[in-house]
Amino acid sequence: MTTAAATVEAPRTHTGTLVQVGHLARRSIIRTARQPAVVVTSMIFPLFLLAINSSGLAAATNLPGFPTDSYLTFALGLTFMQGALFATMGAGQSIAEDIERGFFNRLQLTPLHGPALIAGQLAGTLVLGVTQGVVFLTVGLAFGAGFAAGALGILVMFALAMVISVAFGSLGMAVGLRTGNAEKVQGVFPLMFVFLFLSSGALPRNLLERDWFHAIATVNPVSYIIEAYRSLLITGWDGEALALGFGVGLAILAIGIWAATAALRTRMERT
Amino acid sequence: MTPKAHDNGIEVEALVREFKKGPRAVDGINLEVKPGEIYGFLGPNGAGKSTTVHMLTTLLPPTAGTARVAGYDVVREGPDVRDSIGVALQEAALDPFLTAREHMRLQAGMHGLTKADSQRRGDELIERVGLAEAAGRKVGGYSGGMKRRLDLALALVHEPRVLFLDEPTTGLDVQSRTALWDEVTRLSRQNGVTVFLTTQYLEEADALAQRVGIIDTGRIVAEGTPDSLKAEIGRPTVEAIPSNEGDLERMERVFELFGEKAPAALGAVGVRLREGAEELAPVVRALDAENIPVHNLEIHAPTLDDVFLAKTGKRLEGADAGEEEAAEPRTTGEMEAVGA
């Protein structure tokens, strides 16, 4: 270390929540961008399943009442949903690692506002969600998937992807803040896939047998998110499907933010 | 509440922290650190050092007692305390995916510095801690010493009046440790920053601290300047290993003539010299007269380790490791293979 001349005290202002969100969002985005393994994995796995499903389950399009003759188009909605679930794990692990490393304490020792931490951390998740959307849609369209809602529909799809990413990301954050342990967040991750498998992801609900699976798929909010994506891909403009998709997404976001805020309040013991 | 002028000190009264289903981690400690002073808080792992730091830095509410840091109450005026302090906790809390410069920008921004000031202050501190060349690299690739130095720089970004360093040199090589000591000393002397330093390295407390508090099982068992604490123990000890194990008892009997028994390593005998270091030659002569060949004989000036031993009945963990790496030997004299 070298000795420097005496320093002049830098003027300071009280930072507002929005300014803090900006600083933390920047950090979250840089952090996400510098973990190519996380970014790529969150895209490779859903695309791999898309490839398997669209070739293995192509015969399902012959079922009477199947909404499209392209299973690829049908399955693309599920791919978006899978990407959002990876966002859950990413956001949860990120905050849990901050707690484990002590970085969370570093932030606590600044004039940090709790909401700024949650919003800032979710910025990386949002960027990941949008990046996934671009890749999923590009790959889908390149391999012949249809998109019925046109250019404006693409914008709506990205808006939905953003809502869903931060909604599930906030759930992940709540788990990360509650456990403070990245491994435990990973342990919770497979549970999220239960929601995915017990949804209308593989077949439309009207083609599911009217048994327990149909009942669960009907009450499973994930079904409505997938169906909203699917409406843009297959139907065009379906106000009800979109309203349900956005509505469910925003409801999950509200629950996630509430849970993350409560967990943050418990975690931040500072006086 | 507005802090008093020059109120850079720390005042702690009957501070307690209890954890659920556990003993009191901190059990009613009292201490006072004067403005601009470097206070060494010494104790083994689990003694309550970090819990104390967490309470004084507002990260953990106390169960009972009061503490004022930089003139503010740590419970009622947490934000003011945080605004006045810089903290480097036990593990360098860094994001491995960010560069040093990005860390500085984030930390400065969170503390309300403008973009221009953040950059100026960040560059100045990065330069001061010797990380200018590595400032654009992700800190995941930094050595332990580099991380510690960055941690210190981050703690200083908002010009704190009180600096908390929780075991800042644990795991560092001698060079990094010395560099950090120099910077801490400079901050105290030139900038008048009050430093609360926890450590389990005795020579660190000895080299840096103007006053030392020794904590064991949540209680402060001794407090004073390093010299005054050593003076309490007073007399040097001689520790010797006989060449033949069978001579241990005979050596012990010879040593009894010169003072009371002192703790010694396995296979060695120790004595606290009644009349001081002048008795070393008579001890050697007595061993020679008894025809006890000596494999190794050392005279120890009283150290903080001796103080710790005297106050707690045990040696401090990490003391040996620290001393092996210390630049200065702790013994005032050392002889080998004396005697017949």
Image (cartoon, grey):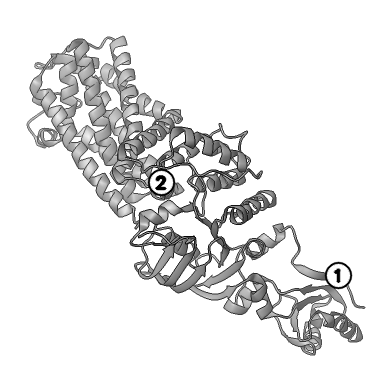
* Residue under pointer 2: A107
Query: What whole-number distance in Å separates the C-alpha atoms at marks 1 and 2?
Result: 54 Å
Q: Name the one closer to the observer, B81 or B260.
A: B81
Q: Quadrant of residue B77?
A: bottom left
- The quadrant in which the C terminus of chain B is found is bottom right
In the rendered view, tell whether residue B208 sits above or below residue A194. below
Report the side of A233 relative to A119 (left or right).
left
Q: Name the one closer to the observer, A124 or B121.
A: B121
- Identified by mark 1, the residue type is Glu
Residue B198: give x, y in percent of width and height: 55, 61
Q: Quadrant of residue B12?
A: bottom left
- Identified by mark 2, the residue type is Leu
Q: Name the one closer to the observer, A33 or B187.
A: B187
Residue at the (49%, 63%) spot, across then down: B9
In this rendering, which labeled residue sits more in front, label 1 or label 2?
2
- Do we see residue A199 in this rendering? no
Q: Name the one closer to the observer, A103 or A66.
A: A103
Residue B107: give x, y in percent of width and height: 45, 41
Chain of the residue under the numbered disc 1 shown in the image? B
Crowding near pointer 1: few (<14 within 10 Å), some, many (20+)?
few
- Do we see residue B103 in this rendering? yes
Crowding near pointer 2: few (<14 within 10 Å), some, many (20+)?
some
* Residue under pointer 1: B336
In the rendered view, tell whether residue A46 sits above or below residue A144. below
